[in-house]
Image: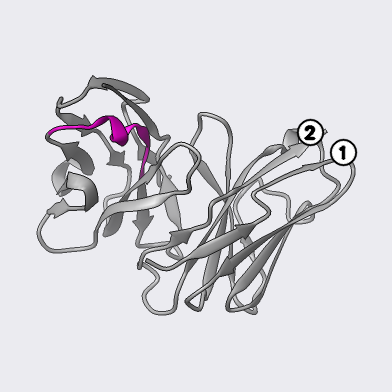
Amino acid sequence: GAVVSQHPSWVICKSGTSVKIECRSLDFQATTMFWYRQFPKQSLMLMATSNEGSKATYEQGVEKDKFLINHASLTLSTLTVTSAHPEDSSFYICSARGPGSTHTEAFFGQGTRLTVV
Amino acid sequence: AQSVSQHNHHVILSEAASLELGCNYSYGGTVNLFWYVQYPGQHLQLLLKYFSGDPLVKGIKGFEAEFIKSKFSFNLRKPSVQWSDTAEYFCAVIFSSNTGKLIFGQGTTLQVKP
């Protein structure tokens, strides 16, 4: 299957700082990317959907100004957690889908473990 | 609201036992259905998917799932589990009325004892 790479795999940052997570599709053009958050022992919660060249669509309850998403190219989307707080500590996962039907398979990155201290 | 529900949160089986994990969704329209697996320390991988056609879908590693439209269900099965099947299993659904985003169930932790 297609490969999606996330970077970094884990990051520790101080409270109040910002952290950027990258999501790259390595061998296909990702017209749509999704960002999820996964708490321990819980499921993946969709945070936002981004289409290349457009503003991201955020799920209800997700702060747009806190979780900045940029999808500037067909192979790269970034999630920036601004002014991070300990409660933002979580596992963040991106997935990417190529062009064509909106119902085709999405491929997942390996996830990024964020710890805010 | 569109939702996905997995009934079993934690399942413990011995090797060679049969497995069935339940998945139900709340929407009555056209759906696309997926089962993903997450092995310890690894990222999500697709086990199988259903879009249309034969409601009995076969996936990788001996897994299969059956789509029963009348029951809004898409249960995952495997006749004989192995220790290497120990993982987290997620059912996910794309509902036709949205933008193609996947909605995940709560996940089921499967522990297979050797």
Q: Amino acid at mark 1?
A: Ser
Q: Position of residue B97 (x, y in %)?
A: 39, 62
Mark 2 neighbour class, 10 Å CA radius: few under 14, some 14 to 19, many 20 or more:
some
> Which residue in the structure is indicated by mark 2?
A86
> Which residue in the structure is indicated by mark 1?
A15
**Quick check: A72 left or right of B92?**
right
Residue B43 seen by the camera? yes
- Chain hosting mark 1: A
Q: Amino acid at mark 2?
A: Pro
**Quick check: B70 left or right of A57?**
left
Magenta part of the protein: which range?
B80-91
Q: Position of residue A92 (x, y in %)?
A: 62, 47
Looking at the image, which residue is at 29% across and 57% down?
B31
Q: Position of residue B34 (x, y in %)?
A: 31, 52
**Circle 1 — which element?**
loop
| Quadrant, the N terminus of chain B | top left
Callout 1 touching callout 2 (CB < 8 Å)? yes
**Is residue B108 in the magenta section?**
no
Looking at the image, which residue is at 22% across and 47% down?
B61
